[in-house]
Amino acid sequence: MPEITREEVAHLARLSRLALDETELDGLAAQLDVILGAVAQISEATDAADVPPTTHAVPVENVHRPDVVTPSLPREDVLAGAPAAEEGRFRVPRILDEEA
Amino acid sequence: MSDLTRLTAVETATAIAARDVSAVEVAQAHLDRIAAVDGAVHAFLHVDADGALAQAKRVDAGELSGPLAGVPLALKDVIVTKGVPTTVGSRILEGWVPPYDATVSERLKAAGVVVLGKTNMDEFAMGSSTEHSAYGPTRNPWDLTRIPGGSGGGSSAAVAAYEAPLAIGTDTGGSIRQPAAVTGTVGVKPTYGGVSRYGLVAFSSSLDQAGPCARTVLDAALLHEAVGGHDPRDSTSIDAPVPPVVEAARRQDVRGLRVAVVKELSGEGYEPGVQERFDEAVALLQELGATVTEVSCPHFRFALPAYYLIAPSEASSNLARFDSVRYGLRVGDDGVNSLEDVMSRTRAQGFGAEVKRRIILGTYALSSGYYDAYYGQAQKVRTLITRDFTAAFETADVLVSPAAPTVAFPLGAKLDDPLAMYRQDLATIPSNLYGGPAMSLPVGLSEGLPVGLQVMAPTMRDDLLYQVGGALEAALHDRWGGPLLASAPELEV
């Protein structure tokens, strides 16, 4: 049976870029334990051992489109939906420390 | 109440084409109906009255024509619409106005369909009750204290409440079919790749599929045909003609058709009332000349665990795009907080509990050390489930089961128990994992609430769903003296 600790959930939250609060971490640890307990049944499908995995329902490979130039969306239309834009670009929060 | 809202899509289109009524009158009648009942039902997140009336005028001016010209439709808020807000039921996209149209939106416009607005849904289509919408739940028109199913509860409720004769839903694990089942409407998940995913906000890319919701099988077929077909902008779109769904819906003949009941999709977890209506409908198919057998699909019992590993894994990756940079919410950008802090705060505030749960679950299933046991094993099980389908279709043309294990449950009943909510998708998930098409259509009432029967067909044989559905629907309407929805209680207007 899986046992997922609060620390593990905190680690997963960091990987997922989710700033969860203490209450959420506690709640999720308990819920994930139950959910993982249920999905762990998948290991009972013992005849899966030598079976190739399915990644996609309908096999498709190397789909190419014609190499034709088509107009992009107007820049201002795209930036209109951004939380912050400046000089015709997306403005992002600081990504480097000042010393860096 | 205006009679115009009670017409089928076919009747509406015929009346408009004959100039018995204008598309503008039809659109206005539905906008009035929405104004009257949607306060109680809450099927819509956004009503686009101006856009709907403008499109209706174009139909009346003869600029647009076709079998669905002038017919109103409710569009699930997971499909992007140029100039019309698209939230996916989430705070993280609140107020976002897409700069482009999904292929589905484009095709609807070109067909002269009048899009009334965007419908409510579980956030990012994760849920089976529409209670995980950040904007409050939708209520079932049959009983306003109950859920309309999910994630496409807004689309199914809009159709059941006569707010629109047609709607578009999306189905990743049952989000078109389970809502159809619990609202007494028709819902179809086409073959994966049958309808373009371009502009469909991704949840689980290998499973997501858009499809029609309607009050009759024929109406669903017309909508299926209007939005289906190859799209070069979706590399997983199937490059083949849409199966002949409209012709099949009109055929009304199942003589000699081989129907198999899936043994594993019954018993524990299925309500007795649901099972009874299902058994009666199967008996009716036999009376209509179909041969009925039972088939075993031994790996279907692993479908639910496989789905709840594959879908959250894909979701954890897909939802990484909500990074507070290109669209939607941004929280904590004070000039001091780093990009990573801003991203983490935005996502924590913008996503609801179920979305966070699935992102964490998916991140776990994809982690090194767990990958083979969870995600890898789930993909192998997906192969075994596909083989079960393939084997079953050697002796049967279609498979049938109840579409949902229960009738509509009361709001709040399963909110604190994620696993109980997940079990709503017991019967619908196998077709998503396999990729084949499946339909839910109403077959009666249990405890005064609708029960749906599911028909499953081989990939690219969507026409078989409509052939079975059309024949069964006609026989049931004869038996009932009209459609099941006619027995739904009138909403207070």
Image (cartoon, rainbow, N blue to C red):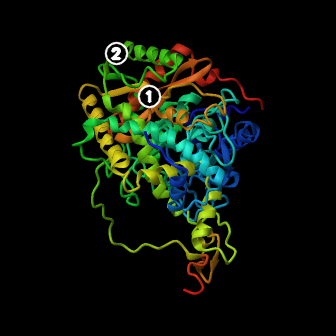
Q: Quadrant of residue B145?
A: top right
- Does B293 sit left or right of B328 as displayed? left
Q: Is residue B445 above or below residue B47?
A: above
- Does A40 sit left or right of B492 as displayed? left
Q: Quadrant of residue B51?
A: bottom right
Label 1, residues with CA under 10 Å away: few <14, some 14-19, many ≥20 = many
What's the chain of the residue with tag 2? B
Label 2, residues with CA under 10 Å away: few <14, some 14-19, many ≥20 = some
Q: Are marks 1 and 2 on the same chain?
A: yes
The three-letter code of the residue at mark 2 reads Gly
Q: Position of residue B278 (x, y in %)?
A: 46, 19
Q: Please tell me the numbered disc located at residue B289.
A: 2
Quadrant of the frame with the N terminus of chain A: top left
The residue under the point 35% across, 46% down is B373
Asked whether the residues under the numbered discs 1 and 2 touch, taking CB atoms below 8 Å apart as contact, a structural biologist would say no
- Does B151 sit left or right of A2 as displayed? right
In front here: B460 or B16?
B460
Q: Position of residue B439 (x, y in %)?
A: 44, 33
Residue at image mark 1:
B454
Q: Position of residue B350 (x, y in %)?
A: 63, 57
What's the chain of the residue with tag 1? B
The residue under the point 39% across, 74% down is A69
In front here: B367 or B30?
B367
